[in-house]
Image: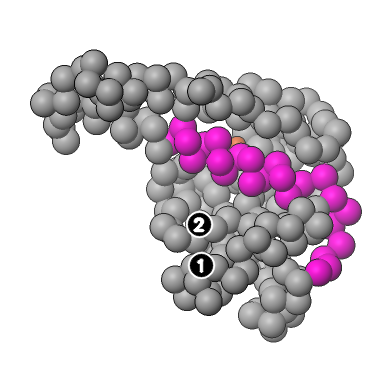
Amino acid sequence: MKYAPKPLPFKKALKGISEKALVIHHDKLYVGYVNKKNEIADKLAEFSHGKKDLSSANQSYSEFRALKDGETFAVNGVYLHEYYFNALGGEGVAAGALADAIVKKYGSLQNFLNYFRACGMSARGWVVLAWDTHEAKLSVYTGDAHNQGGVWGAIPIIVLDVYEHAYFIDYGSDRGAYIDDFFMNLNWNAANAVFETVRYVGR
Ligand code: FE
């Protein structure tokens, strides 16, 4: 069964982030990852159901390796963008159990914002505030590509896309201003809803 793209959970304009940028980001780039995810899944199904020969699998190059490598890139491209869009469209007013847990861990909300912002300036792709199920605690991880830097067993809660396509149209090279506006647009209700579903995993 084909994976269907999720619609944006908010209207196509935010504070600072234009409709043009969001339409390109969601309708072209995100949907493009969904389409590749489906295409790769169809091709891998031929291998997993005995229709294609698995004996050519090879770590230097093989069609099977190319599909498996593309699979994690496309699937993470879909999931990371869905987390990113899910936590946008709000008023940016920190509240709820997640805000409390952040203050408890980082000492203050501002400390967290400063740290997360620095992660955004350091990463080449993604910043993820996650619930790390191994240690049952909040952690911020960074990645330079969809399938690099992810930590197994860490469940994303707030995800920031720092690829140039996310901000260059509206901010030019001023990534810091984009990150500041990301927090201005953060939907803490949505982030809290995710936190409520994951906060007891691993405890
Ligand atoms: Fe993106």
Q: Main secondary structure of the magenta part?
A: helix
Which residue is drawn at the image coordinates 51% and 23% (left, top)?
A: 1
Q: Which residues are magenta?
A: 73-96
- Give the answer, above or below, for where 84 lies relative to 54: below
Q: Which quadrant of the structure image shows residue 52?
A: top left
Decide if residue 189 is on the left or right side of residue 115. Answer: right
Amino acid identity at mark 2: Thr
- Are the residues tagged 2 and 1 within 8 Å (C-beta)? no
User: On the rendered structure, is 45 left or right of 199?
Assistant: left
Please indicate whether residue 137 sits to the left or right of residue 9 in the image.
Answer: left
Spot occupied by residue 116 in the image (x, y as percentages of width and height): 63, 63
Identify the residue at image location x=69%, y=82%: 104
Which residue is the extreme one toward the left? 55
Q: Nearer the viewer, residue 170 or 4?
A: 4
Residue to which mark 2 is pinned: 142
Q: Earlier in the sequence, mark 2 or mark 1?
A: 1
Q: Is residue 122 above or below residue 76?
A: below
- Residue 113 position in % (x across, y down): 71, 67
Q: Secondary structure at mark 1?
A: strand
Q: Residue beneath label 1, please?
A: 132
Residue ID at (70%, 42%): 85
Task: Note whether ligand 1 is within 8 Å of mark 1.
Answer: no
In the rendered image, residue 59 lying in the magenta stretch gets the answer no
